[in-house]
Image: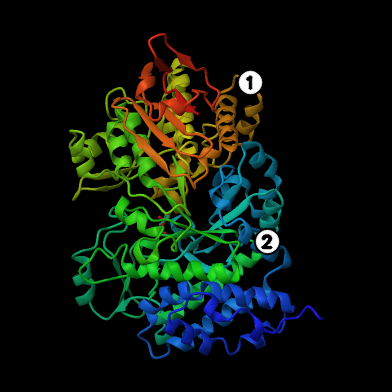
Amino acid sequence: MPDQIPFSSLPPLSDFQFSPEARLCLNECSLKLDEILQAIPERDRQIFQLRLQRWFQNLHDGLAPVYGHRKDFNGFVQRLIEKMALAFVDRPAALKLLDMKRDLQPDWFQHENMMGYVFYVEQFAGKLSGVSDHIDYLQELGASYIHLMKVMQSREGENDGGYAVTDYATVDRALGTNEDLQQVCTDLRMHNMSPCIDLVLNHCASEHPWAESAKAGDEHYQGYFYMFDDRVLPDAFEQHLPEVFPDFAPGNFTLDEKSGKWVWTTFNHFQWDLNWSNPEVFLEIVEVMFQLSNLGVEVFRLDAVAFMWKRLGTDCQNQEEVFDLMQALRTCSRIATPAVAHKAEAIVAPDDLIRYFGVGRHHGKVSNIAYHNSLMVQYWSALASRDTRLMTRALAEFPRTPNSIAWATYLRCHDDIGWAIADDDANAVNLNGFAHRHFLSDFYTGEFPDSFARGVVFQHNPATGDRRINGSLASLTGLESAREQGSEYLVHLAIERILLGHALICGFGGMPLIYMGDELGLLNDYAYSAVPAYAGDSRWVHRPKMDWTKAKLRHEPGTIEARIFNGVRAITQARRRTQQLSARYDTEIVDLGHPHVFSNISRHPIGNLVGLYNFTEHMQWVKIIDLPDVASLRIVDELEQQLLVTDDGHIQLSPYGRLWLS
Ligand code: GLC
């Protein structure tokens, strides 16, 4: 018997669950499939067909609410299926193997050995090919996920740190070629590291060929954007829209001189919002996503997704259609390139944030990973106030997540810190939200008396009083001021704050992301202001070049670099050994009733893990009987710190001490 099963004898569609509409649509749309799939062996064809059948309902459920009312809906779905089939046909064998591996281990990104490292390629390695030269460094740190930033071609001059893309499918010529990207992805994959790059979904550069055609009057491409003949609709929308960059890019619309139209530009005037209600935009982006996936990209950071859908009378963020579109995009990856995961960048309030993992009809179907902005903000808040009550309250109130996802936990990234602290949470712990946010800005600019921080204000908004903050982890935690003062004691405290933060993000159960330079204590880089394209954007203060001379000091015992690097490495190594920290096991917040110690618990069949984090420069004590499920704890510290238990039943935490008790 030949090992060939014709498509018709594959399990019937009814094996998978289909609504009548979806079944009809799939039947109509699969017509040309056999022709496309001819190019690949029978077994591959069957695999594609099975995946298509398995996930088609999810795809249909995502697309129908957005595009289903269009006469050409089935034609659109057919084109999409063809794109998926073509992507699968083109997919290199090594990546098809990875697809199979991930089919067997769909929770790969939740594993306790996942740890991310994030950098601008140019700052870290000069060029893409240089990244491969530093794989030993990444391995030494324990990274298994590498977010490469500003990879695709962006506009000349100001480009919002690369987020004004002129060509989604071509590597920035200053960094190398698509072959270089493919090579780096291969090198990383060979070392068990998953490459991630940005897919900027909400907007492209005003110099992108689509935008250039739109400016020249091409109606097809004008349909890719939101362009208005006059200010009537823009003014109506503006009534409910916040400003993302109130300082250097006020307003949400820009007059394009060439076409004479007002263009929707949520971010900068040179970033034109894409019109996702147009299915052509969906098809364009899917095609790019597949091209990059087939070069070996394993995770897409979906940039600024909250803004992808506009609705008059709302703030045009987190609209239901965003989740439909994201579900559809993710399903496209699941069908054609299933090794690929999606990470949402949505810096929004908790109840909205949770929707990026999928709630209700989208449950678990939207993205795999999302940034835990609140954890990051609460770390900085508790560090400044030396008080963990707000942190405990805000994180305890956080909605629960599906167990198929992972939080990206982080302390710093390439962006600013905005004080996303809800008034309700503040009130619940007898704080005034406005006053506390004001205090945090004062504290992190160093204006507040005795502040250890050296940060820079970003986007002061006089209307709301908001002042966001920039600065490197080390400068914000006091290393810069401690070095200036030449105080070993203050240096010690700054290092302890840095390690406290890393223990927190590694002990929270998601996927921790370390931002380049934080592992060495790199300080603010004030030289950015001399570079014209960066000068207006103080986020560049914390986007320094990697200092490879300093990096060498990590092997010189006693240096600041060695103390931080080895401290961080010890934490990431402990994390790899600690199964409770898999993202599958949700973290619960423990209210110890202690004003200075934060605590969380991960419950696991092999035994629980309780984290304790002292947010002050003083000793703190926690009563053992206050710990949750204390009978099940052996009181072993997985971080291998000095564990001191007093005679009267207290656990002692050193200044900024952290313990993972199992
Ligand atoms: C994301 C990026 C940020 C950028 C913005 C607009 O928030 O992280 O750097 O400015 O999107 O693309």
N-terminal of the pair, mark 2 or mark 1, is: 2
Q: Residues within 10 Å of mark 2 (few under 14, many from 20)?
A: some
Kindly identify the residue that appears in the image at 42 percent across and 54 percent down.
402
Considering the numbered disc 2 on the image, is that residue within a helix, a strand or a loop? helix
Q: Is residue 618 above or below residue 597?
A: above
**69 left or right of 295?**
left
In the rendered structure, the answer to whether residue 248 lies left or right of residue 202 reads left
> Residue at coordinates 56% horizontally, 76% vertically from top-left?
52
Instruction: State the image coordinates of residue 472 (x, y, percent, origin top left).
Output: 45, 37
Q: Is residue 444 visible?
A: yes
- Ligand 1: does it lie within 8 Å of the C-beta at label 2? no
Give the structural element (helix, strand or loop) at label 1.
Answer: loop
Name the one closer to the observer, 516 or 309. Answer: 309
Q: Position of residue 628 (x, y in %)?
A: 38, 30
Q: At 67% across and 49% down in the image, what residue appears?
A: 192
Q: Quadrant of the N terminus?
A: bottom right
Of 521 and 357, the residue lying toward us: 357
Residue 484 picture quarter: top left
Ligand 1, image quadrant it occupies: bottom left
Residue 207 can be seen in this image = no
Left or right placement of residue 24 versus residue 468 in this view: right
Count numbered badges in the picture.
Answer: 2
As drawn, the label of residue 557 is 1
Q: Is mark 1 within 8 Å of ligand 1?
A: no
- Label drawn at residue 199: none
The x, y position of residue 399, in whole percent, is 33, 49
Amino acid type, label 2: Gln
Three-letter residue code for mark 1: Pro
Q: Which residue is mark 2?
A: 182
